[in-house]
Amino acid sequence: MDKTLEILPQNKVKQLYPYQTLAIQQIMEGITQQEVKKNIIFQLPTGGGKTVIFSEITKRFVLETGKKVLILTHRIELLKQTYGVLEEVGIASKIIVSDVDKIDDHESFSCYLAMVETLNNRLQEYENYLPDIDLVIVDEAHYNSFRKIFQYFKGAVILGFTATPLSSNINLPLKENYQRLIVGDSIPELIKNQYLSEATTFTFDVNLESLKIGIDGDFTVSSLERLYSEYDMQDKLIKAYEECSLGSKTLIFNSSIASSKVVEQLFIKSGYEIKHLDSTYGKEERRETLEWFKNKPDAILTSVGILTTGFDEPTVETIILNRATRSLTLYHQMCGRGSRILPTKKTFKIIDLGNNAKRLGLWQDFVDWKEVFLNPNKFLESLAVWEEKINSGLIYNLPEYVKRNFPKTASFGFDMEETYYNMLKKARKTVEAVDLSIEDHYQRIIDNTDDLFEALDLLNLLQDEIQFRLRVYTNCMAKSTRSYFLYLLDNYNDRIKNRLRKELYK
């Protein structure tokens, strides 16, 4: 054994879960048993323990081959976290940060850890800066900033780790650098086997028409900032928190520092204790803020960017997405911050204020990552088609908080499109589909109250669903105008109100 490797006592080494052991076995076989060098990318959901897995792979690779490993991360927090795990498993490693210049004692280290920009500068300054590297491990491999490093390690196997094997740049697909994808356990599997918490998502419809799309394919920060600084959005945020998250440890994700600070002031004025955190905070201030968040049961922390990766606080009970994104990776990163499981925490909540679940699916939905990896353009095109339907108002899921106001209703499954085409098949007037929808909503209200004023409140709760049904109806028609839609909407509400008054005003 290399004298630089002081393996820790077994009781100090983190116990591997069965799915992690299987993943390590598959990856090690892929690295060591290939006749022709093939780069590998490994997918595992946020919270599945990617750092533990690649730290164990590093240990085994060094012990079994006697060769050296380079680990690349893109955040200092991830770098330090990885160093700590490697120290636990007994790997003598060297952190390459901005104040580390030329390295003269290579024989003392079996592993190097570096952030991509710092290492790239050193590789340009010094020839053969890191000699004899046979394995390069890339954390958060979906980021394209790592590609510039690969040219210096052409003889090594590149092993990437990510929760979402979808490149951050549509023009640079991951399959150009990685020849094989290994898929770990899915989110549904990890939930079923009690390795991740189960999520309940609360969706609140948001009008995103004002948002602009930037060159990176996501919504621009400036347009997000304008939208989420409006009074209506702030009011919706507070109401969503009070309705679904009051008293729970809550982490809020925003699109910008300015938006996060607006949220901080909003909650303070509403009487809630909250702290803001962003990348401009110093080391000590950041440590104090995260310590406060860890120890306070009902703490609210609002942030931007900084806590999407490399942040691990299992006690988080609610994630609020106070922003919209078209990035599946960012969406999974944000939601995954609440997925850690504890003996006292088996579930968590996601409050979606950006139509993200509609656009990208529920966090816990199964995703065919092999298909995403092999055909990223096809996957993104399907998302674009889906998003177009959302923007047209043709996708809608009745929120759980609305359903809770109708406890005596057994089914919420009225399908306007199906009803419309059934009328056509039966050679009946298609407007009868609207009549049936009105009857469905009327019956839902009347089944759950015998008070007129409460009934009118329930009707107000159904306005988003009513508009959705009418959008579907008018979309089924060959031609339809905005004025006709508004006429249908007014008529729809008037008819229900009149029936409610006749039935309940006695």
Image: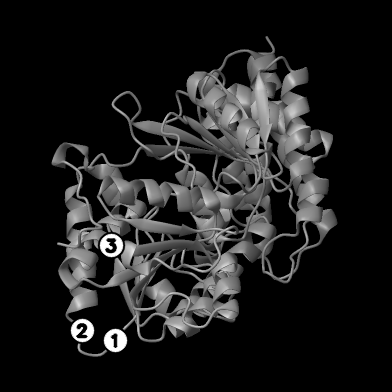
Indicate the secondary structure of the residue bearing disc 3.
Answer: helix
Q: Position of residue 36 (x, y in %)?
A: 25, 90
Is 256 on the left or on the right of 168, as rendered? right
Q: Are marks 2 and 1 in contact (CB under 8 Å)?
A: yes
Residue 108 visible within the image = yes
- Which residue is at the far front? 104
Estimate the spatial distance between the alpha carbons at disc 3 and disc 2, rounded to whole Å. Answer: 18 Å
Q: SS at mark 2?
A: loop
Q: Secondary structure at mark 1?
A: loop
Q: Is residue 111 above or below residue 413?
A: below
Residue 439 x/y as whole percent? 58, 37
Q: Residue at x 74, y 18 (%)?
A: 270
The quarter in which the N terminus is drawn is: bottom left
Residue 441 at x, y = what percent? Answer: 58, 35
Compared with 328, 464 (above or below) is above
User: What residue is pinned by disc 3?
Assistant: 58
Q: Tell me how the rendering is colored.
A: one colour
Residue 169 drawn above or below residue 207: below
Quadrant assignment, res 459: top right
Residue under the point 68% across and 22% down: 457
**Residue 343: which quarter of the image?**
top left
Q: Which mark is residue 34?
A: 2
Q: Amino acid at mark 3?
A: Thr
The residues bearing labels 2 and 1 have C-alpha atoms spaced at a distance of 6 Å
Residue underneath mark 1: 37
Of label 3 and label 2, which has the lower sequence position? 2
Q: Amino acid at mark 1?
A: Lys
Q: Nearer the viewer, residue 429 or 283?
A: 283
Disc number for residue 45: none
Q: CA distance from mark 1 to mark 3?
A: 18 Å
